[in-house]
Amino acid sequence: MTSRQFLIRDLLVLFGLTGWAVALPGFASDFIVSMALTCLMYIALSSSWALFCGTTRYLSLATSAFFGIGAYTSAIGLESLSWPVAIAAGAGIAAVVAIVMGLAVLHLRGTYFAVLTFGMTELIRHAISYFEKSVTGTVGRVLMVVPERDTIYFTVLLLAVVAVALSIWIRRTRFGLAMQGIGGDEQRAQTLGVNTRLVKTAGFALTAAIAGAVGAAMSVRWTYIDPHTVFNPFIGFQTVLIALIGGAMTLWGPLIAAIVFSVLAETLRLQVPQVYMMSLGLLLILSVLYLPGGLASVRGDTFRGWWCDLKAWWQETKDDLSGETERRKQREKKQREARHVY
């Protein structure tokens, strides 16, 4: 398939999924809509995270910081701002914070970058907690202005579509190629004339803007928020897990994994939370061992390869149990000795 054919295919898939999601509130129960809302939230977060971190190989743990900034921006400004302006404000402030954070830490890579982004997330959370307790005298905020359920749902749906559409578009631009070059060999990309500092900061800010907008939209779902809720590190960790298990380098991997995780979350987390956490760990281990490209890399050849490996393992186990392996070793040893004597 040519690049144009791939583009048309991706757009058609996105259009079909969007149409199905638009129709969902009209016939589904409140539980299904709530599950779909969670799914859309993680589609937006993981797709935007993979757009930057998957291509540049910078492991950011700051998603929960941008999510919480957007949530608090919406909570503070929603009484005086319209719904679209509150969402835009959450995205804008999160992007500004990301630019400042990026200029400070994006010269680092690997574990240092991951630890620093997580540390800055905790710094922002504790700073807001201190401000709430010392200045406002409160621990959290009660949201008095809450939009209708469908307004929240369609807003998060729009953000998810925007995140996936941006991934489709940016991967085909010079900006996307520059991020891929940084992920492949940053020093070489600099040698070829790529302004890596500008590209990394812009990509980091774009990811933060989407996370901030999602946080601003999702904050009204709880009607009461506090720093522990909206700056919860689990939001950031689960976003990273979804992207990695789905395939951070792929377009549709985060979307596929977000659907799987949302179903697991709603069916297991409330009833057997230990099983849910074990499932997350098991999926991550299996992906690392057998699907380094994520769920999106599963093809027919993948299952055939697994089947061949399973048959080879079973044959080897049978030979070990029956003693055939030891007898074969003895025969090979005798053959080597005979050749040596000759």
Image (cartoon, rainbow, N blue to C red):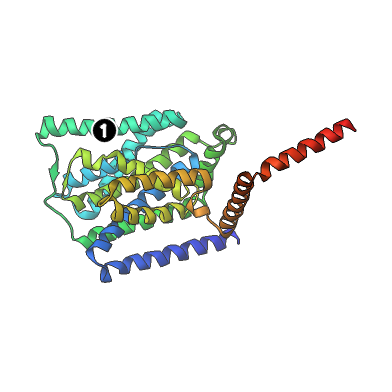
Q: Residue at x 19, y 54 (%)?
A: 82
Vertical placement of residue 181 versus 247, above or below: above
At 53% from the left edge and 38% from the top edge, which residue is drawn?
182
At 46% from the left and 53% from the top, the residue drawn is: 253
User: Could you tell me which secondary element the residue under label 1 belongs to?
Assistant: helix
- Give the total of numbered labels: 1
- Quadrant position of residue 278: top left
Residue found at x 40% / y 40% = 204
Residue 118 picture quarter: top left
Q: Nearer the viewer, residue 199 or 314?
A: 314
The percent coordinates of residue 30 (x first, y second) are 22, 63
Which percent across, then down, holds residue 178?
53, 42
Q: Give the residue pinned by disc 1.
A: 124
Residue 116 pos. (x, y %): 37, 29
> Which residue sits furthest right?
342
Question: Can residue 216 be seen from the camera position used here?
Answer: yes
Q: Amino acid at mark 1?
A: Ile
